[in-house]
Amino acid sequence: MEDLKQTIISYSSRDLKQRKNWYSPAAEAYNKARPRYPEELIHQVVEVAQLSTNSKIIEVGCGPATATVAFAQLGCSMICLEPNPNFFRLAQHNCQPYPNVEIQNTSFEEWALETSEFDAVLAATSFHWISPEVGYLKAANALQESGYLILLWNKELQPCYEVYQRLSQIYQLHAPSLDRYQDRETQEEILRGLGKMAIDSGQFKDLISRQVVSEVTYNIDEYLMLLNTYSPYLKLAPHNKEALFAGLRHSIEDDFGGSLHLSYISAFHIAKKI
């Protein structure tokens, strides 16, 4: 739990300008390659958080509207905050069919708090970018009495362990720091920790958590595009990334027929304002 807190603090303590532009080089790839949240999970969120056409939602860090559209389809009113200018433009485009959705190009930290205004605060794989000292309190203050904090998470897509072991050899050659594999148990432990942090903030109660495992197949180009959207790859020196991706491409073509079967956990934490 302490390791998780330190990781989140390291993300959220980066300079705000750096955080705003972090994903800019990968914004288009993120929009295309990152998976959406499973319909089954969204239905459960809507039910647990009692969302309806009449709900008013504020979304923290909507990205290119990866989760936004699923909630916009309810016809509810949404204000979606996105500090990254590239994501902001993509979110505007992706939400064009939904007149009740307003995208604002600002961070949650800079957003002028509207107190006790919203039925739900939504954050989809984004709340770890907000300092815990700021995030939970501001979220609680934005909510009406008995409003809900909704945290959605998509964990990293991964091949099965046997496939990982083969690809691991390429990582050891070109980017050993990225050679890591999180088994299901580790990912579930991280998710439990994220839920516990919301309760430990003292702002929320009655935590409900659920998860769904999805399986997808990505071809080589889709898989390399996906890797390009993860933070450790964004930090990788260009020549290392080029060598790594060439090795991965060669292996996926020769050893796995040009595509990879991947799985990922999607989860939610929903907690009620105290």
Image (spheres, rainbow, N blue to C red):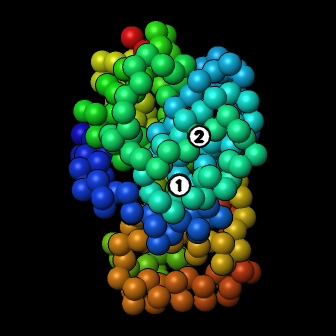
- The structure residue drawn at horizontal position 52% and vertical position 84%, both measured from the top left corner, is 245
Where residue 18 sits in the image (x, y, percent)? 31, 61
Front position in the image: 74 or 136: 74
For the C terminus, the image quarter is top left
Front position in the image: 39 or 60: 60
Looking at the picture, does residue 53 appear above or below residue 166?
above
Q: Quadrant of residue 57?
A: top right
Mark yes or no: residue 188 visible: no
- The structure residue drawn at horizontal position 60% and vertical position 52%, both measured from the top left corner, is 91
Three-letter code for the amino acid on which mark 2 is drawn: Glu
- The structure residue drawn at horizontal position 43% and vertical position 16%, both measured from the top left corner, is 116
Q: Is 125 left, or right, of 94 in this rendering? A: left
Where residue 214 sits in the image (x, y, percent)? 68, 48
- Disc 2 is placed on an element classified as strand
Cα distance in 3D space between marks 1 and 2: 11 Å
Mark yes or no: residue 151 visible: yes
Badge number at residue 56: none
Q: Residues within 10 Å of mark 2 (few under 14, many from 20)?
A: some
Judging by the rendered image, the residue that carries numbered circle 2 is: 102
Judging by the rendered image, the residue that carries numbered circle 1 is: 88
